[in-house]
Amino acid sequence: MADNANLVKAELRELDENFENERNPDRTTTVQFNPESLKVSFANQVQTPEGSGDQRGTPARQFVGAGTTKLALLIWFDVMALPDGENTENDVRNLTKKVSYFITPLETTDRPPKYVPPAVRFIWGSFQFDGIMESLEESLEYFSADGRPLRASMSFTLTQQKIKAFTVAASERGRRPPPVTPTAGSAGADPSAPAGTKPLTSAPTGSSVQGLADGAGIGADWKQIASANGIENPRFLNPGQLIDLNIKTR
C-alpha cells in the first residue's frame, strides 16, 4: 500500500487580500483523504448585442466582462480512520469545521465594513489554485450509536475572476516526475490481461477492500488488491470508487 508517511496531501491555505502571500498558518488545513479528481472549468461573460434579433444565421456575440476559472472537488473525513495517536476525535465536525472556515465571511477594515470570505490557496503537489470558496456542501455519512457523525464528505468550488490555467506550485517548478515502477495489478504487470478487458468493481457506500475481496472469494489477497489499486485506507472506500479485483497476485 501507499506509504502514508511519504504521501503528499492536499492543503488549503489562507492568502492575503491581494492573493499574493500566505498568512495565518494556523488556519492551514490538510485533507485527510486526497480527492480522486479535480475539475477545472472556464467561462466567459458574453451577451447578444441589441438589435441582432432580426438577423439571419448566427448572431454576433460581444464580450462584456472578465471570465472566470473554477475548481471543483470532493474530499472525505473519517474519525474512525485517523492514525493511531491521532484518533482522539469523536465527531467528524471537529475536522470539517477547518474547511468551513474558508467560506465564512470576514469583516474588512473598510468603512462601512464589508464581509468577504478569505482568499484561499488549494495546493496538492505541483497543482496550485488561488481563489475564493464560492460554495461548500457537507454530507454526514455515518453515525455512532449515540448520534455523533463520524464520517463526512465535503464538495466545494473555488473561483477566481479571470481565465487562467492552474498554477504549478513554486516548490515543484523544474522538478521531473519520479519514475513509474509497475506493481502487481498495474499496467505492464500482467501482459496477458490487456487494459479494459476485465471489469472494475464499483464500491458501495460503507464498503472496504477486505469486504469486496471476501465477496469475490479472494479475501486472502486484499492487501495485494489495495496495494495494486493505490488505496491509502483499505478500511474505507469512497462510494462509487472503481476497484480492480482481477489483479494477478503473487
Image: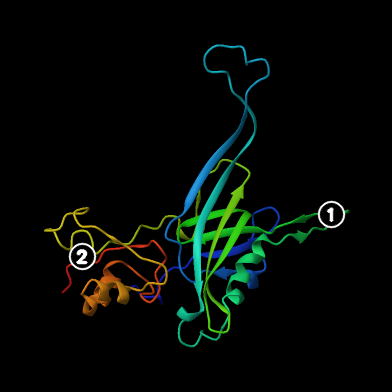
Q: Is residue 181 left or right of residue 120?
A: left
* The N terminus: image quadrant: bottom left
Question: Which residue position holds label 1?
Answer: 110
Question: On screen, 50 above or below 136?
Answer: above
Inspect the image, locate mark 1, and give the three-letter code of the amino acid beneath it.
Asp
**Residue 225 visible from this viewpoint:** yes
Q: CA distance from mark 2 to mark 1?
A: 61 Å
User: Percent from the top left, x then y, of residue 199?
Assistant: 24, 57
Question: Is the residue 6 above or below the residue 89 in the image?
Answer: above
Kind of element beneath mark 2: loop
The kind of secondary structure element at disc 1 is loop
239 or 79: nearer the viewer: 239
Quarter holding the C terminus? bottom left
Disc nearer the start of the sequence (2/1): 1
- Residue 133 horizontal/vertical position (percent): 63, 56
Please state the horizontal and vertical placement of residue 208, each as a whole percent of the image: 36, 74
